[in-house]
Image (spheres, rainbow, N blue to C red):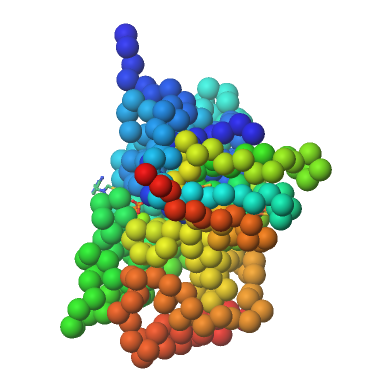
Amino acid sequence: MKLAIANPRTSKENKTGDWRSFKPIVHTENCIKCGTCASYCPEGCISGVDKKNIQEREFPKIDYDYCKGCGICANECPKKTIEMVQEEK
Amino acid sequence: MEEYFASGHTACAGCGMPITVRHALNVLGKDVIVVNATSCLEIVSSAYPRSAWGVPYIHSLFENSGAIAAGAVASLRVQGNDHTKVVVFAGDGSTYDIGFGVLSGMLERNDDVLYICYDNEAYMNTGNQRSGSTPFGAATTTSPAGKVNHGKMQWKKPIAEIIAAHQIPYVATASIGYMADFESKVRKAKDMKGARFILTLAPCVTGWNYDSSKTIELAKLAVDTGLWMLYEIEDGKFKLSLRPQQFKPVADYLKMQARFKHLSEEQIKTIQEHMNKAWAEMK
Ligand SMILES: Cc1ncc(C[n+]2csc(CCOP(=O)(O)OP(=O)(O)O)c2C)c(N)n1
Ligand code: SF4
Ligand code: SF4
Ligand SMILES: [Mg+2]
């Protein structure tokens, strides 16, 4: 019997990054690795800053395959160090 | 970190609902079964043959998530599983209105379910129709602003109080703009038994009509203006989670959203006064 059940996390086949018209760029020189951007990203597509211990964190890394360019990360970053740059064709 | 709600879901850019779900599941962990009433959440996360879920997931009807969850938990417990949590995610249309009778039954039986409503203040999945949750003055497709009416003419239904009247162990309100508070409420509810209910404000870019970068800012502002109160009712005891030191004017919040753009200064004043009165009664 074949059941019509979707496998976990197969949404990752949807590359929602192509929805984007503005691209977030992290200027790491001012970044304090607080993780605010990653916490509020609706796509959960920012990694690197999720370790509990700040010393063990890397700079935020955005997965552009999924980033829709909403701008929440840039708006919430306490150091205002994420810039939204218009995508080009 | 293990993902329980994966990228590639198709919610609008900037939507508050996936932020709600991702954080709730991070707190709850993988030993859960999710029941999800028909809503934007269901549409954006489970279009066959793909799924964003990393935990077991049941899509219920719009109106019966409370009953599906009650059945799921009863079957777990009868099999001797006393650890798996059953969690409902449902929208405001489902919670305040269409699924309310069934939810009321779940509460009255005190079924061992954590029910989380993500409140975007209208029936968004079908294109922004007014719900019992839509606030006074908001324009929706079924409460348009025109010559006679200025958006919805009724106040928001006090759903958390109505739910608390069922005398369940835990009721709380939250906002994704105060994430640590939301997470601590989920953490507390996680280890309680019986029916628990958390109402979370989750702004909708498309329906509220604002710039997609402002979702968290608005969810904070709703609290800082006093329009959205954060509180808990634990075993019948009411506890305010936060009292804004200095209330921001409600106009700051309303003017960021096109659903309120038709409101006159007079109507904004009506909203401000209604809010002031609610806080005056809070002492
Ligand atoms: C009985 C029934 N009536 C109407 C619908 C159509 N419908 C599907 S989702 C939805 C709106 C859901 O609103 P809400 O619960 O607030 O969730 P949201 O979409 O806003 O996230 C409606 C009206 C339905 N599925 N079932
Ligand atoms: S919010 Fe800003 S400062 Fe904090 S980790 Fe992200 S980029 Fe760095
Ligand atoms: S722009 Fe939006 S989707 Fe893209 S990384 Fe920032 S918060 Fe995430
Ligand atoms: Mg809704």
In this view, the residue farthest toward the left is B147
In this view, the residue farthest toward the top is A1
Q: Nearer the viewer, residue B55 or A30?
A: A30
- In the image, is residue B104 above or below residue B193? below
Q: Nearer the viewer, residue A48 or A23?
A: A23
Taking the spot 35% from the left edge, 47% from the top edge, the residue there is B40
> Is residue B120 toward the left or the right of residue B128 in the image?
right
Taking the spot 57% from the left edge, 46% from the top edge, the residue there is B23
- Based on the displayed image, in which of its 4 quarters is residue A7 positioned? top left
Image quarter where the C terminus of chain B lies is: bottom right
Q: Give coordinates of residue B219: x percent, y percent.
A: 51, 64
- Residue B175 visible? The answer is no
In this view, the residue farthest toward the front is A89
Q: How many marks?
A: 0
Image quarter where the N terminus of chain B lies is: top right
Q: Give coordinates of residue B187: x percent, y percent.
A: 65, 47
> Is residue B232 toward the left or the right of residue B151 in the image?
right
Q: Give coordinates of residue B208: x percent, y percent.
A: 37, 64
- In the image, is residue B203 above or below residue B126? below
- Residue A19 visible? The answer is yes
In this view, the residue farthest toward the right is A55
Taking the spot 45% from the left edge, 30% from the top edge, the residue there is A12
- Based on the displayed image, in which of its 4 quarters is residue B61 positioned? top left
Q: Give coordinates of residue B85: x percent, y percent.
A: 56, 36
Taking the spot 22% from the left edge, 64% from the top edge, the residue there is B141
